[in-house]
Amino acid sequence: MAEFNHVHSATEMPEGDDAKRSLHHRMFLEPQDKKRSMKALVVKQAKKTCSCTPAKVKDYVFSFFPVLQWLPRYKLREYLLGDIMSGVIVGVLLVPQSIAYSLLAGQEPIYGLYTSFFASIIYFIFGTSRHISVGIFGVICLMMGQVVDREVQRAGYDLEPDALRVLSDTAAYVNTTIPPVNQTSQKLLCDKSCYAITVGATMTFIAGVYQVAMGFFQVGFVSVYLSDSLLSGFVTGASFTILTSQAKYLLGLDIPRSSGIGSLIATWINIFRNIHKTNICDLITSFLCFLVLIPAKELNEHFKSRLKAPIPVELVVIVAATLASHFGSLRETYGSSVAGRIPTGFLPPRPPDWNLIPNVALDAIPIAIIGFAITVSLSEMFAKKHGYSVKANQEMYAIGFCNIIPSFFHCFTTSAALAKTLVKESTGCRTQMSGVVTSLVILLVLLVIAPLFYSLQKCVLAVITIVNLRGALRKFKDLPKMWHLSRVDTVIWLVTMAASALISTEIGLLVGVCFSMLCVIFRTQRPEAPLLGWVAESETYESLSAYKNLQTKPGIVVFRFEAPLYYINKECFKSTLYKQTGVNPVWVKAAKKKAAKRVLREKEGDSGGNQTSISMDFVSEPLGFHTIVIDCCAIQFLDTAGIRTLKEVCKDYREIDVQVLLAQCNPSVRSSLIRGEFFKEGEDHLLFHSVHQAVDFALGAQERSATSASK
C-alpha cells in the first residue's frame, strides 16, 4: 500500500512548524481489491447471458416490445384526447410532405404515403419515446434519391421514352404477381418507377439491418462522433442540395438530376443553361405558393403559444392547387408537370432485390448512422424535457425495424424528424398512441383520397419541400452566437456545411467527422499550460494569466498541463514547461559542462585567475527556483511516451538541483506511474493529493535545507 502514502512519515520531520506541516500532509488511501481474472469475468458474463428463467424471458419480451409495458397502463380519459388531436394534426401535415419528399427520394408519391403509414405503426410497437414523430426526413430522402438516380441510370432506364411512365403503377402491380419463371417479361414490365422503388426498398432494408446490428452489438457510441455542431452543419449543407434539386420543378424544367461530387454546382449550371425553357405556368404557381406558405408558416410560429393547433396551410395549398390545376387544365394547356395517377390501396409485399445489395450496401452506412443518430438524440432530448426515460439501444432497434419491415411493402428509409416532433409535442401528444392515429389519417388518404391528387403540379410539392428547409437555413443567424460560445464548433459547422453542400452529402459527413476529430487532437496537441498562483487565505491555486492578485511562493513554480500527456503532445509539454519556467535544464547542463571545460583548460594553461573566477561564478550561478510542482488534475491519462517524458523532465531538473513534485494525479495516472516504475525506491512521497500539500512540502524542505546549511 506504500504507493498511496504520498507524504513523509512524521519521524522524518523536525519539530515545530515543519512537523505541523507534515501532519497536514499525512494521508493514507487503501486501494480497492481488483479482480483481474479474465476467465472469471467471461464465465460470469456467459452465465448471466445464457441463463434462461421465466422472469428473464418476460423482461426480455417486455423490453423488446415496449408497447406491452405502457399500453396496459394507458389512462384513457387523461391521454386519449391529446393523442387523437396530435395524431390527426401530424397526419394532416404528413400527407403533403410525404408526397413532396417522394420526389426528393426519386419515388412516386404513393410510396411516400406507404412509408409514413408503416413507420408510424411500427414505431408504436417498438419505440420508447412518447413524443418523436418517425417518418420521412428530408436529408435522408436526398441521400436516398442520389443513390436511386445512380442505379436507375446504370440500369439504362433513363433511355425510356416518357410515355412509358404511365405504365408504372400497372407494372408495379403485375411484378408482384407474375410467376418467377417469366423473368424476361418481368424485366420488360418493370419500368423506371418500379425499378426506383426496388432500389429504394433494398437500400432501406440494408440500412435497417445495420441499425438493428448496431443495437444488438451495442455500438451506439458511434453517434458520439456526430456532435451537435457537426449534425447541424451537415443538415444545413444538405438543405442547400435539397433546395437545388427542387429548383428545376419550380421552373418546370425537364433536366437530368446531377449526382456525385459537385452535384450542386453542376445542377445550377444545367438550370441556367436551360433557363430559357422555363414553364411560365409552373413559375407563377410556385411564386403564388411561396406567397401563401411563407407568411402562413411565420404566423404559425409567431402565434404557436395561442393556437391550439397549427394551421394546416400545406394541405390547404395542395387542395387549392389541385383544384386549380384540374379545372384550369394546366397540364393539357401549358404542359405543367403533375403528380399523375396515385393508386388506392396497397401493393402486395415483395422482398428487396438481393442482387442489388452489393451496389447499395456501402451507401446505406451513412444513411443508417444519420437516421439512428437523429432519432436517438431527439428521443433523449424530449424524454429529458418531459421527465421520463428512453432506452437508446431500443431506439436503434425501433428505427431499424421501421426500415426493415416496410422495405417489404414498397417503402423507403425513415427516421425521426424535428419539425413534426415539435408539432406533435405542442398539440398535446401524451403517448405513442398518437402515431396510430397518424397512420389512420394516412390510411384514409391511401384508401380513398389519393387519386384526387392526380392534377397536383410538381412545382407545388417542390415549394412545400423548400419552405420546410427554413429551420435549417436559419442556422446562419446563430453563427455570431456560436462563434462567441465556441470558435472550434463554429469552424466545424462551417466546414461540414460547405463540404456537404459543395462536394456531396456522404463525403461532407465524412469530412465533418474527420475534421471534428482532428480538432480534438489539435486541442490536446497544443493545450493550455499556465503557471499557477496562490489565492490568499485559501488552499486554491489558479492561473496567473487568467486572474489578478494571485501570489507566488518564493522558489516554487506551479505548472498545470490541461490535457492528457501522450505521444502526440509530449514535446509540447516539455517545450511549454521550459518556456514557462524560463529554464531549459538541457541547456543549463550543457552550459555548465562547457564552462567547466573552459575552467579546466584555463587551469591547465594558467591563463589568469580573473577569467577562472568568472567562469566558476557562472557554473555556480543559482536558478530562480528550487522546486517545480506539476498540477496533474487535467491529465486524464498517460501512455508510455507520457511516462517517459515525465521521467526525463524529473531527471533533467534533478541534475540542475531542481526538485519536481506531482500533485492531484487521478487513480489512473497514479497507476500508470507505478506500473511505469516512475518512482525510485522510497521516492513515492513526491506524489501529492493537492497542490497546496506539495507547495507546503517544498517550503518545509527548503527551510530544513537552509537550517542544516547554517549549522
Image: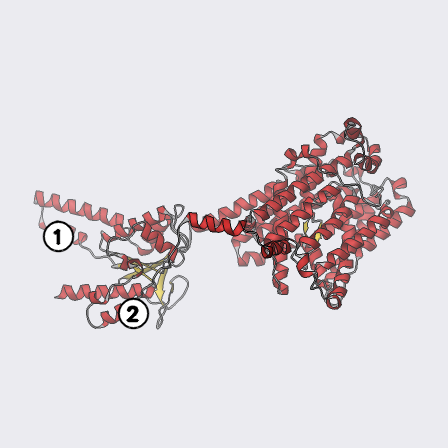
- Three-letter amino acid code at the position of disc 1: Ser
Can you give x and y, in whole percent of width and height, for residue 625 in the image? 26, 59
- Three-letter amino acid code at the position of disc 2: His
237 to 354, vertically: above or below: below
Image side of residue 137 versus residue 598, left or right: right
Residue 78 visible in the picture: yes
Q: Earlier in the sequence, mark 2 or mark 1?
A: 2
Q: Quadrant of the C terminus?
A: bottom left
Pointers 2 and 1 in contact (CB under 8 A)?
A: no
Can you give x and y, in whole percent of width and height, for residue 114 in the image? 77, 46
Q: Quadrant of residue 167?
A: top right
Residue position for label 1: 613
Q: Residue at x 15, y 64 (%)?
A: 708
Q: Residue at x 58, y 46 (%)?
A: 214
Task: Give the camera-side residue of 603 and 441.
Answer: 441
Q: Which mark is residue 342?
A: none
Q: Quadrant of residue 269?
A: top right
Mark 2 and mark 1: span between their CA atoms? 45 Å
Bin the neighbour count of mark 2 within 10 Å (Cα to Cα): few under 14, some 14-19, many 20 and up: few
Q: Which mark is residue 24?
A: 2
Q: Assign a secondary structure to mark 1.
A: helix
Question: What colour scheme does the image use?
Answer: secondary structure
Task: Give the camera-side residue of 60 and 674.
Answer: 60
